[in-house]
Amino acid sequence: MENYVDNSFNHVVSKEQVKSFFSGVYAYMFLGLLVSGTISWYMASSGLFLELFVNAETGSVSPLFYVVAFSPLAFVFLIQAKYRSFSMGILIILFIVFSALMGASLSSIFFVYSIGNISTTFIVTAGAFGAMAILGYTTSVDLSKMGSLLYMVFIGIFIASITNMFFKSEAMGYWISFIGVFVFTGLTAWEMQKLKAIASDNSIGEGDKKKLSLIGGMSLYILFVNLFLSLLRLIGGRD
């Protein structure tokens, strides 16, 4: 049996254990993307988005849209803070609800961009994301310092994005998206290296490792969606 030796933890972990952990990570990531994609497409195509989130008289989005758009943050914090005390079943339910809420807010892109532009950008995102994921997994360079710096930039981007919701500056939106592409690709490599360390740590119990695979899948999902949105604003074009 092939083994990995992680010097930082000094534990021996089988190749099968690492493979099993990442299988779970990617399964949850793809589950989140599937749920979000299905919900967003249905809400846009059925007219439910316009019915729930758009004021028919003014044409502006309703307060409910902002509640739905920001509510996934609460689920992220809840899952990360309480994963040890919650059962795996509850965590999966919370993750699915999180993904559904993300899909509800993402349905707005169908009213701004064409299906062709959305599909093309999704493919480009998958390629860039996959390349950085492989880089993060295989590199021997410690990415922790880079990750900490990019995470701080990410917080700045988040605050700037909220501010721009009120100012609606196209130039500001462009620069946020441009910087975001570099931030989210870099964070993808950092996150993969971090997940590899978790997978290689045999001191983590099997139950906790399964829960951490869900959190890892959620983290990669968030990075993928943010990279997709950044690229869509830059190269997607508008209808």
Image (tube, rainbow, N blue to C red):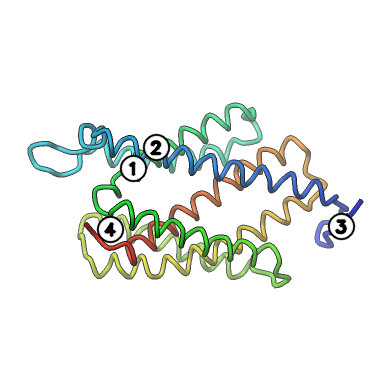
Badge 1: residue crowd in 10 Å (few <14, some 14–19, many ≥20): many
Left or right of 206 in this view: 142: left
Labels 4, 2: front one: 2
Location of the C terminus by quadrant is: bottom left
Apparent side of residue 202 relative to residue 211 in the rendered image (left or right): right
Q: Are marks 4 and 2 in contact (CB under 8 Å)?
A: no
- Amino acid, disc 1: Ser
Viewer-nearest residue: 208 or 177:
177
In this picture, is 43 found above or below 116? above
Give the spatial CA distance, label 3 vs label 1: 44 Å
Q: Secondary structure at mark 4?
A: helix
Q: Secondary structure at mark 2?
A: helix
Residue that carries the numbered disc 4 in the rendered image:
163
Distance, label 2 to label 1, CA atoms, is: 6 Å
Q: Which residue is mark 1?
A: 105
Q: CA distance from mark 1 to mark 4?
A: 18 Å
Q: Are marks 4 and 3 in contact (CB under 8 Å)?
A: no
Closer to the camera: disc 1 or disc 4? 1
Q: Is label 2 in contact with label 1 (beta carbons under 8 Å)?
A: yes
Tell me the tag on residue 10.
Answer: 3
Which residue occupies 34% across, 35% down?
42
Q: Is residue 132 left or right of residue 7?
A: left
Residue 75 appears at what percent x and percent y? 47, 38
Q: Which residue has dot 2 on it?
A: 101
